[in-house]
Amino acid sequence: MPHSHRQANKRVTIKDIAQLAGVSVSTVSNVLNNRTDAMTEQTLERVLAVMDELHYRPNLMARGLVTRRTATIGVIIAEIETPLFLQALSYMESIARKAGHNLLIAKARSIDDEKQAIKVLTAKQVDGLIFLSVSQYFDDAHLIELRDPDIPVVLVNRATRHNEFDHINWDDTAGVEQATEHLIRLGHQCIAHLRGPLSRQSGANRLEGYRKAIERHGLTYREDYVRPGDYTMSAEQWRQSTLELLDLSPRPTAILASDDVVAAVVMQAIHRAKLRIPQDVAVVGFDDQHFSPFLHPALTTVRMPVLAAGKRAVELVLGKITGERVETEHILLPCTLVIRESCGAAARKREVN
């Protein structure tokens, strides 16, 4: 079958080139990344000849991919102040560098910021784009306009799904379900939740996970046990919500906070009310921030797979850049319950024992 006919029916990949040139996939990747110093002239010429014969990604070749590729990946991050995302950036950068790429980072809290960041990074001819988002519901029309087969895009923690782009999200719903069920197994029946912002998918999903677990185990879902814990708001709001919960009858024996920073304020309010953690009120957070093990007592929390998401995002972009991957992927990563000291068994259960 002629190679040109193969191209007409099936998009040529880096594996096709390697097979026809009689070399390894890594050799073809080295050619694409202009890492040819240790390569014989005959091998280089053979690989380039096969690329030319198969018209391999001709639009990228026109940009001078083989000889003038920028070897950069743009990362647009919504909250650079968040330690979790900062950890991910460091991890992503090390993975990209091993593959011969560097990261160009831009901060964008709003749609206008994001549009400007896209403009700047594409002007610098980045080879791909990764968005580290905060699951806020946005009008993503500007992303649809970004569609370009030469610039692969990966969306991490984006609220709205787009079939044109690779997506990586984590399962907030199941993470909170797991935490709530753990409290129920410990004997807690009066479990409250400080909910996150409903303008973000994460806030809505965590509330859903809490409610599903409560109802699955035959407990009554009480509206007064759900109070604002919007982690984009002030600590005073979280403190006030906690005090309102502590005044209820029956008083909750456990509080699920919307994230670890909120949980720290919840713990402070409980201590100031002369109550004990976990003997009187258990506390569970969400995120597994770096300070969580050092709270008093150490905070039980739900760990988001931010590092795994960052690693996977870089791998997805590189796969598209080199041609090793063609398909679009939508990935949902699991969250992990990290059990520490703040979620002890319910007081009533211990008294019976």
Image: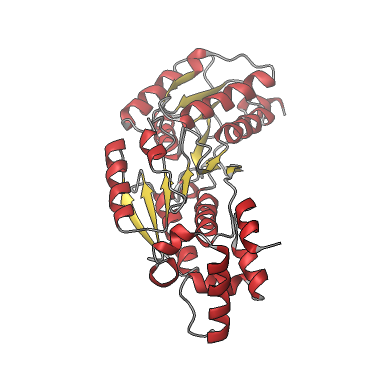
Of residue 150 and residue 292, the one placed in the foreground of this image is 150
Image height of 252 relative to 60, above or below: above
Q: For the N terminus, which image quadrant? A: bottom right
* Left or right for 330, reference 144: right
Residue 352 visible (yes or no): yes
| Quadrant of the image occupied by residue 139 | top left
Across and down, in percent, residue 333 comes to: 59, 43
User: Eyeballing the image, is 353 above or below 121?
Assistant: above
Q: Is residue 78 left or right of residue 12?
A: left
Q: In the rendering, at what x and y percent does residue 288 appear?
A: 50, 45
Quarter of the rendering occupied by the C terminus:
top right
Residue at image location 27% in from the left, 38% down from the top: 112
The percent coordinates of residue 187 (x first, y second) are: 67, 27
Residue at x 47% of width, y 29% of height? 203
Quarter of the image where one finds residue 175? top right
Judge whether 196 appears above or below 78 on screen. above
* Front-lying residue, 92 or 58: 58
